[in-house]
Image: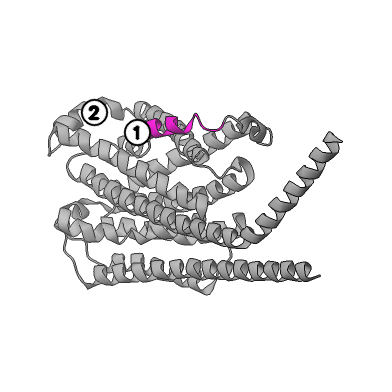
Amino acid sequence: MGKAREVQLQIMGNEVKEENSGELDPGHQSTKHQIKGHIWWIKMGIYSLFVLSGQTVATLLGRLYFDKGGNSKWMSAFVQLAGFPLLLPFYCMLLPKNSTTDSIDMDRPPALTFAFLYVSLGTLLAGLCVLYSYGMSNLPVSTFSLICASQLGFNAFFSFFLNAQKFTFFITNSLVLLTISSALLVFQPDDSSDSKKISKGKYIIGFLCTLFASAGYALLLSLTQLAFKKIIKRNTMRAMMDLIIYQNIVATCLTVVGLFASGDWKVLSKEMEEYELGKVSYLMTLIWIAAGWDVFSIGAIGLIFDVSSLFSNVISTLGLPIVPVLAVFFFHDKIDGVKVVAMLLAIWGFVSYMYHHYLDDSKSKAGRENATQASQASTSEEVQI
């Protein structure tokens, strides 16, 4: 009798819970989706700021390194990757998370698969950094920015085949505007003394290295998005930090090997002593280049993680016209109408892409509201019956 009474009370309690959840669920779900939407836009803003600020600072300081006496391409590549220890304190904070991850880990690929992923991406990343270093040292900043803009077209190609990227009018419009904005920079004359010193042979080497690096970087972004979908399969900050740190460890080790194999390490002390701004400035320039690319990596992979590789590249391309404009203030370059038009077109392309996401967000909200209304209508009909 007592057990029957307990069962009856449990059934009554479950019925009350179901009724309450049915009453509260539609509004609660709607509020929950709104909060998630706001958090998503805030994260996108933060990641975009990281990409733009990190890329701009690191590129300007990279140019400063070569302008003031730096000459080692392997050192330039090394500092693009060696900033990952700055992330280790934050990474350690993520380690003691859930103790229930063992059940989740059962569905994950074996450790050997992750090792192969990190080694492959790290090797590709190291090669790209070396190519970018050769390009930056042998090209004027305007030409370097122009060729880097081609990575957006390469990324659109790879995203279509590897990530099943769909192209709408606003995405296509954004790609065209951002590409044109950076392409306009080639018509801006570069009157710096360094550009006049570049021989034709070095110019061709710099052009080809930057072009291959742009194509390779676009492939890297698409492969990263594919890895999150097919291998990593975790929507957590820990997964993102794992990818950044482990691939950077591999890439850093490879550039260190290249630094010693090329013999560049022998002239680093002489390079530091002859640096025009002094030894302290030499070290601080390299440290802040590393920190800038670290910030860029967090933003870029965060955008891949939450949106797509194409969107990450759109934000990166948006920052390309910023570098020549800021060079006016830091390197006393001349500014003209071409730079202004390039900046305006870049902003227009960025707004076009964000408007595409705004429309998607509005459609998803409308879909959720219709589903909620249909659920409420069916519930009321069942109550009437």
At a point 42% along the width and 29% down the height, the residue shown is 253
Residue 303 x %, y %: 46, 52
Residue 71 visible within the image = no
Nearer to the camera, 152 or 357: 357
Return the mark for residue 335.
Answer: none
At a point 53% along the width and 35% down the height, the residue shown is 118
Task: Give SS at disc 2.
Answer: helix
In the picture, measured across the screen, residue 129 lies left or right of residue 232, that is: left
Tell me: residue 219, above or below residue 70. Answer: below
Q: Main secondary structure of the magenta part?
A: helix
Q: Which amino acid does label 1 sit on?
A: Leu
In the picture, measured across the screen, residue 184 lies left or right of residue 18, that is: left
Q: Name the residue under label 1.
A: 86
The range drawn in magenta is: 87-98
Tell me: residue 334, above or below residue 239. Answer: below
Residue 267 x %, y %: 24, 28
In the picture, measured across the screen, residue 326 lies left or right of residue 229, that is: left
- The answer to which quarter of the image holds residue 176 is bottom left
Residue 320 x %, y %: 33, 58
| Gap between marks 2 and 1 measured at Cα | 26 Å
Q: How crowded is mark 2: few (under 14 residues within 10 Å), some or many (20 or more)?
A: few
The quadrant of the picture occupied by the C terminus is bottom right
Residue 25 x %, y %: 63, 58
Q: Name the residue under label 2.
A: 267
Q: Does the magenta stretch include residue 125?
A: no
Q: Are marks 2 and 1 in contact (CB under 8 Å)?
A: no
At a point 62% along the width and 41% down the height, the residue shown is 231
Q: What residue type is labelled 2?
A: Val
Tell me: residue 295, above or below residue 349. Answer: above
Nearer to the camera, 183 or 12: 12
Pointer 2 or 1: first along the chain:
1
Residue 78 visible within the image = yes
